[in-house]
Image (spheres, helix red, strand yellow):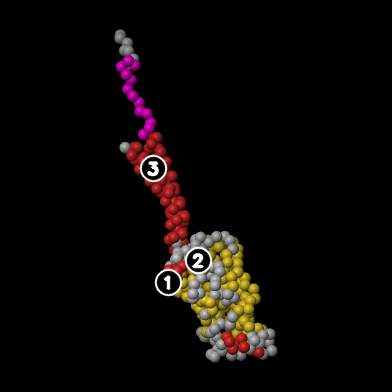
């Protein structure tokens, strides 16, 4: 009976020991992916910012500039691209909508971002664009890979249409979560005029005909939860200028926008709560269950060996008649 129990325990030990690496290195890379139908929005604010008044073409101080960013998954487009790409694909339609303190639009820049659902690497397909212009992204955007590492990544800047390193600066605690802090600097770069401008009738072509150009620089900061690869907080020290041309009169340049952009408090709280719940699922697949199964396998193996040893232990036997001690008569 002990022999049968030992064999059963040994089989279970092998099963759980084998399941541990399979769960971590085979199941997790296939199960962990960004859903194709995901929708998310975020509100950022730049208080005491500088904003261009297109009516007077002069920069002025304003109490607040608000940036609303939305990302909406296009399921039909992702399924169509998956047929030719041969892998799970996510298509995000993004919109960055900027409004001034009076609620009027400052700029509106749409983009389509196509990427691998598991690795977050860009997938190049028809429709990939920023503000209607076709682009070919390199590097990540919006989200880091699952199990983010302590290293630099390549990050795509939609304003400049360039990819530049975003540097790992260290590990920090952010509202109870261990996060990796990343920072990217885009130096002053000439960028395209947005296709949608706040003045009716004013087009990018009309601005370009005046010889005026648009320049941009930013310091981009992200605090990323490493298991999920999701940023829980972000900031930008953002500056834009219009330079040269007859549109500015006798001035060399004018500030179009300057401000320290930060996530609004209610969205910080919502994001931290959401990421906290999601990281538990990732931790189960990458740490808790694999290590738990491995430990269980070791314990079952030890118990199986113990029962086997008990089963092989010799038992005492009664002495034979020839070995009996003769009795002494009185």
Mark 1 or mark 2, which is nearer the start of the sequence?
A: 1
Q: Position of residue 177 (x, y in %)?
A: 51, 62
> Marks 3/2: CA distance?
41 Å
User: Mark on residue 10?
Assistant: 3
Mark 2 or mark 3, which is nearer the start of the sequence?
A: 3
Q: Is 19 contained in the magenta span?
A: no
Question: Who is closer to the viewer here, 256 or 13?
Answer: 13
- Choose top left, top right, bottom left or bottom right for residue 87: bottom left
- Look at mark 1 in the image and give the residue it sits on: 80
| Residue found 45% across the figure and 58% down from its top | 28
Position of 225 with respect to 16 (left or right) is right
Residue numbers of the magenta segment: 311-323
Question: Who is closer to the viewer here, 96 or 47?
Answer: 96
Q: Quadrant of the N terminus?
A: top left
Mark 1, other Cα within 10 Å: few <14 / some 14–19 / many ≥20: few
Do the CB atoms of the residues marked 2 and 1 lie less than 8 Å apart?
A: no
> Marks 1/3: CA distance?
48 Å
User: Mark on residue 216?
Assistant: none
- Look at mark 2 in the image and give the residue it sits on: 120
């Amino acid at each position: 009976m002990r022999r049968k129990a030992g064999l059963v325990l040994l089989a279970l030990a092998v099963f759980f020991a084998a399941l541990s690496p399979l769960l971590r290195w085979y199941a997790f890379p296939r199960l962990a992916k960004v859903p194709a139908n995901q929708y998310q929005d975020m509100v950022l604010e730049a208080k005491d910012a500088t904003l261009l008044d297109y009516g007077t073409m002069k920069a002025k101080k304003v109490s607040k500039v608000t940036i609303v960013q939305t990302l909406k998954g296009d399921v039909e487009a992702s399924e169509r691209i998956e047929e030719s790409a041969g892998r799970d694909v996510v298509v995000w339609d993004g919109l960055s909508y900027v409004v001034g303190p009076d609620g009027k639009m400052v700029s509106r820049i749409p983009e389509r971002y196509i990427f691998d659902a598991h690795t977050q690497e860009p997938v190049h397909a028809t429709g990939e664009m920023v503000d209607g212009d076709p682009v070919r992204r390199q590097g990540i955007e919006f989200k880091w890979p699952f199990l983010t590492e302590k290293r630099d990544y390549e990050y795509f800047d939609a304003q400049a249409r360039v990819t530049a390193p975003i540097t790992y600066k260290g590990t920090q605690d952010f509202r109870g979560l261990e996060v990796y802090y990343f920072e990217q600097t885009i130096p002053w770069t000439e960028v395209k005029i947005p296709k949608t401008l706040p003045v009716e009738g004013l087009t990018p072509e009309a601005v370009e005909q005046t010889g005026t150009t648009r320049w941009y620089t930013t310091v981009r900061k992200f605090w990323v939860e490493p298991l999920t690869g999701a940023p829980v907080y972000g900031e930008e020290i953002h500056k834009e200028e219009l330079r040269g041309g007859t549109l500015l009169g006798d001035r060399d340049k004018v500030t179009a926008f300057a401000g320290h952009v930060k996530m609004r408090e209610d969205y910080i709280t919502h994001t931290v709560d959401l990421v906290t719940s999601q990281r538990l699922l990732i931790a189960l697949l990458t740490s808790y269950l694999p290590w738990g199964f491995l430990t269980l396998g070791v314990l079952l193996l030890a118990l199986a060996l113990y029962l086997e040893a008990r089963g092989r232990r010799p038992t005492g036997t009664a002495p034979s008649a020839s070995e009996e001690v003769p009795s002494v008569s009185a």
